[in-house]
Image (tube, rainbow, N blue to C red):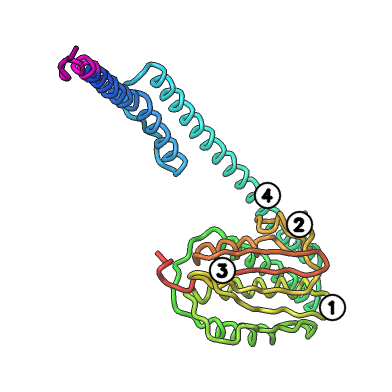
Amino acid sequence: MGADKKQVFQPLNDLLTRYLTIYSIVFVSIILAVYLLTKTLVRPVQELVGATEDFIGGKEFIISDNRSFEEMEKLNLAFLRMMETIEDREREIVRTEKLKYVGQLAAGVAHEIRNPLTTIKGFFQLLKSQDHDKSLIEKYSDVMLHEVDRVNVFVTQLLDLAKPHQLEWEKIDLKDFLDEIIDTYTSSIPSSHVRLINGVTQSVIVYSDRNRLRQVLLNVLNNACEAIEEKGRIELHHNSVSQYIRLVISDDGKGISPENLKNIGMPFYTTKPDGNGLGVATCIQIMEELKGKFQIESVRDEGTKVTLTIPTTNRLIK
């Protein structure tokens, strides 16, 4: 017996066609389902993640009004309430910190000004209570003028810390600048127990405000000299990083204990009997104004290292 080839394979071709049609329909359905799922579930989650990242970056937390599943709507609202709560708490923390800082500032100002005023008042009472010869009056007057000078220095430092300055940016050769400061400062050191070594031996150009940078360097040198009780030395050297110079001032003085080091830079915190704690705080403020950094490291009985990061290009200055 014989059979037509076409008749034999026709049922198989029909079956294959049906399978292909069914698979195509299923494939298209899966793609459509994935698309709808992405639109209704995945995309809102992505938008929520993006809004959260924007909030972390300091932008306002905004979510779209696109409605999807009820659960996603609830999740969006929950996140919105959470962000509002975080913002409220941040504002409360900032307000509390400001009040705390104002309290510390007021206490420090009162303490620093009250002591000289008490001394001045006492000497005025002495002068008023009885007659004195000219030499004694001059002696009392010198003490009172000294106390007035103390108040004036304190107020000046306080203004330096709080008042913004109009900076005069210029190109400065760091080597010549340091040579000039060291020559001037060496002549004013009360004793010869400190040796200053300038390790910046080649011309290095930085962009800064000459007077403000000088103020920082003189303050650091003063602190370093006071930390050296016997003979010692202060060394200055530098290294370069991208668009910055790191100027390192190191001494071999008595150093700072870890418990004191963590508080260095806080206004009115000082370990000196006659200090007011504004020197380092002012230096930190000035270096921030100069688009740089002030960093301090110290080891007790080994010495202290201060690093000033200074811009080398005016592109950082806005």
Q: Position of residue 151 (x, y in %)?
A: 66, 64
Q: Would you say 32 lies left or right of 262 here?
A: left
Task: Choose the circle earlier in sequence order: 1 or 2.
Answer: 1
Numbered label attached to residue 309 = 3
Q: Which residues are magenta?
A: 1-15
Q: Nearer the viewer, mark 4 or mark 2?
A: 2
Q: Amino acid at mark 3?
A: Thr
Task: Choose the circle earlier in sequence order: 2 or 3.
Answer: 2
Q: CA distance from mark 1 to mark 4?
A: 35 Å
Q: CA distance from mark 2 to mark 3?
A: 23 Å
Numbered label attached to residue 230 = 1
Q: Is residue 5 magenta?
A: yes
Task: Choose the circle earlier in sequence order: 1 or 4.
Answer: 4
**Disc 2 element:** helix
- Which residue appears at 68% of the width and 53% of the height? 108
Find out whether the residues at labels 1 and 2 contact each other: C-beta distance under 8 Å: no
Find out whether the residues at labels 4 and 3 contact each other: C-beta distance under 8 Å: no
Q: Within the image, what quadrant is residue 216 found in?
A: bottom right
